[in-house]
Amino acid sequence: MEDNNVKEKKHFFHKKEKKTEVAEVPKKKKKVWLIVLIIAAIVIVLIGSAVKNMTSQIETAANMVEVEPVEKRDLSDSVSLKGTIAGQSKTNVMSLAAAEITAVNVQVGDIVKEGDPLVTLDQKDIEKQIAELKTNINNANAVAANDEAQKQNSLTQNKQDQQDALDAAQKTIDKAQADVDKYKKKVSECEDYIYYLKNNYKDTSEYDGKLDVFKSSLETAQNALDSANDNYASVLKNTDRSVASAQNTVDMQKYQTSTTRDLKDQLEQLQKQLADCTLSAPIGGVVTAVNVSVGDKNTAGTTMITIEDTSSLKVIVNVEEADILKIQEGMPATVSTDATGDEEIKGTVTRVVRVKNQSTNTNGTDTNTSSGYSAEITIDNTELLVGMSAKAKIVIKDRGTQLAVPYDLIRQDDNGDSYVLVAEANEDGTATAVRKNIKVGEEVDYYTEVTGGDLKEGDQLIYDNTFSVTEGQVFTPEQIYSNQALDTEGMMSTEAE
C-alpha cells in the first residue's frame, strides 16, 4: 500500500514537474522580447540623438561667419614690380687695335679702380706699320715740296716775263707819246707864226708847207701811239693768262697732296691703335663680363671687358603696359631682396623707359631689360651685388594710413547710403549682426577708404561678400571664426584651422 502510495506521489510530482516546465517556457520568451525592446529603444534614442546632433552641427556649419577687426591700413597706391640690381652706369671697354691679345688681367667679379690694367695686346706689327708710314710720308712730303717749289718758280717767272713785256710795250708808248707831243708843239708854233705873217701882210707859203709836213708827222705819231697802246693791252691780256695759269697750278698744289693726307690719316689711326694696346679701367667698379682670352685676335669695336660702376646702385624693373603711364621720375620706391630679408631699402625712380625694347643687348652705359617697358630705381644701399634679383614697390600716390574695409563688404540701402555689418557681442556669448553706416572715399586695390560714419577701429567686421547675413541675425560662438586671434569678452577666441 505504501509503495503504491509512494509511487502515486512520485508520479504526481513527476506530472507536476512536467506541468511546471510547460508553464515556464512562455515566461522566458517574454523576458527575451523585453530585452530586445529595451535595446531597440536605446538604439532609437541614440540614433535620434545622433541625428539631432548632426543636424545641429550641419545647421551650425551652414551659418558659420568670419569676422575680422576693422583696421587702419596704408592705402597708398603702388605698383609692385620685379627686377635686377645693376650698377648706376655700365662701361664697355673696347680696343681699336686689330692685334693679338697677350694678357688679360681681370676676371668676372673682380673689383677694379680707375686706371687698373685690364688687357694687353701685341703692338709689334702696329709699330712696324707706323715706321713704314712715317718713311712714306717723309718721301711724299719731299716730292710734294719739290713740286711746289717748281710750280712757284714757274709762277714767279711768268710774272717776271709779264713785267718785262709790259715794260717794253710801255717804252714804245712813251716814245710814241713823245713824238705826238713834239709834233703837236711844232704844229702849234707853225700855226702861230703863219698867223703872225698874215697879220703883217707877209708871205706864208714857206710855212704853209712846213705846217702840212708837221701835221702829217703828228698824224703818223698819233697812229704809232694808238698802236703802242693796243700792243700794251694785248701784252697785258696774254701775260695775265700765263700768270693766272701758273697761279692756279700753285693754288691746286694743296689739293693735290691728298696722298700725303691719306698717309697721315692712316698714321693717326695706327697711333690710336698703338695707344689701345694697353687698356686700363676707365672707371672703378665691378667686372661683369670678360669676353676675350689670351691668344685671341681682337676685332676693332668688339666689347672686351664690361665694368659696372657700383658706387651707387639701381634696380632695373620690367613694367607692364597697364602700369607704365602711372610711373613718373622722382616717385619714391622701396626695394627688397632675398639677401636683405625683410629690410626695405629706400629708392627713387630716376628713369622711365616708355619704348618697348626689342632685344637684350647692351650698348654704351645703358642697360636693357627684356622685351617690354622698364624703369630704373636708384637705391641707397650699395652693399648689394650686381645681378641680384629684387622686388620693388613704386608709390604712385601716398595716402598714408586710413581706416578701410574690403570693397566687396560694403552694402547700400534703398537710399544709396553705404553701410557694413559688424558682430556685436551679447552677454550670453552670442553675437548680433549690427549695421554701421559709413562714408566711403577712394578705392585702392581690395580696400575702400572710410572717411566717416559709425564704424570704428576694432569693430568686428562681418566678412559676407554674398550679403546672406541680415541685420539682427544672431550667431553662436561656434558659428563665429576669425583668421586672427580675437578676445572680445567671451564672444570668441579661436583661430581658423
Image (cartoon, rainbow, N blue to C red):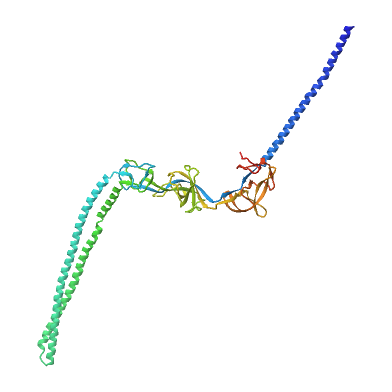
Q: Is residue 353 above or below residue 197?
A: above
Displayed quadrant of residue 51: top right
Q: Quadrant of the N terminus?
A: top right
Decide if residue 210 is in sight here: yes
Residue 372's x, y, as percent?
Answer: 47, 49
Residue at the outermost right position: 1
Left or right for 223, reference 442: left
Decide if residue 354 is in sight here: no
Displayed quadrant of residue 214: bottom left
Q: Nearer the viewer, residue 46 or 199?
A: 46
Residue located at (19% from left, 70% from top): 234
Displayed quadrant of residue 186: bottom left
Q: Is residue 117 above or below residue 251?
A: above
Q: Quadrant of the C terminus?
A: top right
Q: How many marks?
A: 0
Q: Is residue 486 above or below residue 218?
A: above
